[in-house]
Image (cartoon, coloured by chain):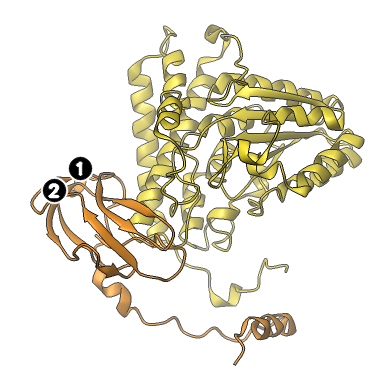
C-alpha cells in the first residue's frame, strides 16, 4: 500500500441510523454477490463477451451513491456493475441486460459496459477511458443553466487521469463552478500498468489544485469515510462551490477483465489489500453496535442471494429484442 | 465443464496442467485446470460442486472455446449456488447451433448502415 492514504478518523458508528447502515451493507453484499454470480455465468459459457468486474471496490460505489439524492446523476465506466447497483438499478434489470434481453435496463443493447437507467440517474456507462469526464461536466452545466439543484458524480479510474479528457473536463467544470463530483477510484492499476509507471505525482487529488478547486484523498475501502467525504463534496457542489475531486484509494480483487489473470499484482500487495476488504471492515464496525447482530447480516446475505438466483432464472428465460427493434433507440 | 472464452481472439486455448485428479471432489470456485491463452496463463475455476469424473483433454492440447474439457458429476443441484448449468442445452451442442437467420434490411438509415458494412468488408 502506498504511503499517501489519508484515512478518516474513527467515525462514531453510533450516530448513524440503523436502517441506513443495513441498507449500505446490503448494497455492498449485492454488488459482491452479483459480481461473483456473473463470473460463474461467464465461466460456464452462458454469458458471452468479456466482463470488467469490481470485486473489492464495493465501498467506493456505495459510499458515493448513498451520499447522492435519487435525482442526482452519475456517469460510469466499463467497470460499472457496482455503480449501477449502488445507484439503485436492480439485479434483475442488469442481468436481463447482460443476457441481451429486451427487458434489460438498456433493452438488451448495451450489455456489461453500458449499464444505465436514466430514470434512476445513471446514464449508460461510458466505456472509453476518461470519456465520461467531459460528459459529466456537460451534465453539470445543464443543471446549472437550468438552475436545477442536482449534482452529478463522475466515476473514473486512475487510468483516466493521464487522458486529455480529464484535463478538459476538470478545467471546464472549474471555470464555470459546475456541480460535478469527480470521483477517481484509484485501484493502483490502469489495466496492467501500475500507477507509478505513468504518473510522477501519484497523489491524484493534488491535481485539483491546478484547476483551482478542492481535492481530497480518502480511504476508499472505508465505506463511511467515502460516504462522509461524498456528502461534504455534494453539499459544496449544491452550494455553488463545486466542483470537487475525490480520490478513493481501493483495489480490485480480480483481473482487469475476465481474461486477465492479474499476475502483475504481487502476492504481498494482494494479501495486504485483501486483508483490507471493504465489506469485512464494514462488518467489523457494524457488529460493534448493540442493535446489529450477525443474524441481521446473515439474513441480508440470504435475501440478496435469493434476489440474484431469481434474477438469473428470469434472465435465462427473458426474450431477446425483436429484429424490428434493431434500429429503435439507436442514434448513431 | 466447457472451455471458457478466455482468449481475446477466436484462437484455441492450450491446456497446461490439470490441477484436479479424476475422482476428486471439486468445489464451485476451485481452480481445476491451468491453461494458456494467446495472452497469458491462467487457472480455470469450476462453476459447480461435484466430482470430476472425466477429463476430456490432455496437457498441451489445443482446445476451442466452448468445447467440453471435463465431466463433473454434480453432487446435489440444490446445494449448488444460483447458476446451475442449463439442462436443455448440453455443452457439446454449442458448436452445432445453426447460424442466426440473416437480418432483414434496415428500414431506416439505410445509407449509413450500408456505408458501415462497406467500410467493414475486408478488401478482396
Q: Residue at x 64, y 83 (%)?
A: B117
Q: Report the disc number at residue B79.
A: 1
Chain letter, colour orange: B
- Find disc 2 in the rendering and name its residue: B75
Q: Residue at x 37, y 20 (%)?
A: A296
Q: Position of residue A202 (x, y in %)?
A: 67, 31
SS at mark 2 in the image: loop
Which chain does tag 2 point to? B
Badge 1 local density, few (<14 within 10 Å), some, or many (20+)?
few
Q: Colour of chain A?
A: yellow
The residue most toward the bottom is: B124
Decide: is A59 above or below A133: above
Decide: is B105 above or below A70: below
Compared across the picture, whether A241 is left or right of A22 comes to: right
Asked which quadrant contains residue A139, the reply is top right
For marks 2 and 1, give the CA distance.
8 Å
Amino acid at each position: 500500500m502506498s504511503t499517501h492514504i489519508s484515512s478518516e478518523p474513527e467515525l462514531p458508528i453510533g450516530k448513524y441510523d440503523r436502517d441506513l447502515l443495513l441498507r449500505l451493507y446490503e448494497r455492498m453484499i449485492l454488488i459482491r454477490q452479483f459480481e461473483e454470480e456473473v463470473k460463474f455465468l461467464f465461466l460456464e459459457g452462458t454469458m458471452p463477451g468479456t466482463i470488467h468486474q469490481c470485486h473489492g471496490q464495493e465501498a467506493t460505489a456505495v459510499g458515493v451513491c448513498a451520499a447522492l439524492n435519487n435525482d442526482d446523476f452519475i456517469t460510469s465506466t466499463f467497470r460499472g456493475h457496482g455503480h449501477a447497483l449502488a445507484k439503485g438499478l436492480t439485479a434483475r434489470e442488469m442481468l436481463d441486460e447482460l443476457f441481451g434481453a429486451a427487458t434489460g435496463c438498456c433493452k438488451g443493447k448495451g450489455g456489461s459496459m453500458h449499464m444505465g437507467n436514466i430514470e434512476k440517474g445513471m446514464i449508460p456507462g461510458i466505456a472509453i477511458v476518461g470519456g465520461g469526464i467531459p460528459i459529466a461536466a456537460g451534465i453539470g452545466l445543464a443543471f446549472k443553466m437550468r438552475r436545477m439543484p442536482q449534482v452529478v458524480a463522475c466515476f473514473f479510474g486512475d487510468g483516466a487521469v493521464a487522458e486529455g479528457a480529464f484535463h478538459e473536463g476538470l478545467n471546464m467544470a472549474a471555470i464555470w463552478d459546475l456541480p460535478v463530483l469527480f470521483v477517481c477510484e484509484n485501484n493502483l492499476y490502469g489495466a496492467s500498468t501500475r500507477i507509478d509507471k505513468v504518473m510522477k505525482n501519484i497523489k491524484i487529488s493534488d491535481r485539483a489544485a491546478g484547476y483551482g478547486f478542492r481535492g481530497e484523498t480518502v480511504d476508499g475501502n472505508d465505506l463511511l469515510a467515502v460516504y462522509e467525504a461524498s456528502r461534504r463534496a455534494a453539499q459544496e457542489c449544491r452550494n455553488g462551490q463545486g466542483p470537487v475531486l475525490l480520490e478513493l484509494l481501493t483495489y480490485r480483487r480480480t483481473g482487469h477483465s475476465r481474461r486477465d489473470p492479474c499476475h502483475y499484482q504481487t502476492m504481498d500487495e494482494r494479501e495486504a489489500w485483501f486483508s483490507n476488504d471493504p465489506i469485512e471492515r464494514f462488518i467489523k464496525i457494524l457488529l460493534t453496535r448493540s442493535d446489529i447482530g450477525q443474524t441481521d447480516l446473515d439474513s441480508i446475505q440470504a435475501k440478496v442471494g435469493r434476489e440474484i438466483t431469481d434474477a438469473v432464472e428470469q434472465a435465462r428465460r427473458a426474450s431477446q429484442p425483436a429484429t424490428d427493434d434493431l434500429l429503435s433507440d439507436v442514434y448513431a | 465443464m466447457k472451455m471458457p472464452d478466455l482468449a481475446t481472439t477466436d484462437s484455441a486455448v492450450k491446456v497446461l496442467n490439470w490441477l484436479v485428479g479424476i475422482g476428486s471432489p471439486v468445489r464451485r470456485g476451485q481452480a481445476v485446470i491451468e491453461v494458456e491463452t494467446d495472452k497469458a496463463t491462467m487457472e480455470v475455476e469450476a462453476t459447480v460442486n461435484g466430482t470430476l469424473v472425466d477429463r476430456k483433454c490432455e496437457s498441451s492440447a489445443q482446445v476451442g472455446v466452448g468445447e467440453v474439457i471435463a465431466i463433473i458429476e454434480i453432487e446435489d443441484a440444490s446445494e449448488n449456488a444460483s447458476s446451475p448449468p442449463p439442462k436443455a442445452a448440453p455443452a457439446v451442442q454449442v458448436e452445432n447451433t445453426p447460424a442466426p437467420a440473416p437480418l432483414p434490411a434496415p428500414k431506416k438509415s439505410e445509407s449509413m448502415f450500408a456505408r458501415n458494412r462497406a467500410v467493414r468488408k475486408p478488401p478482396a
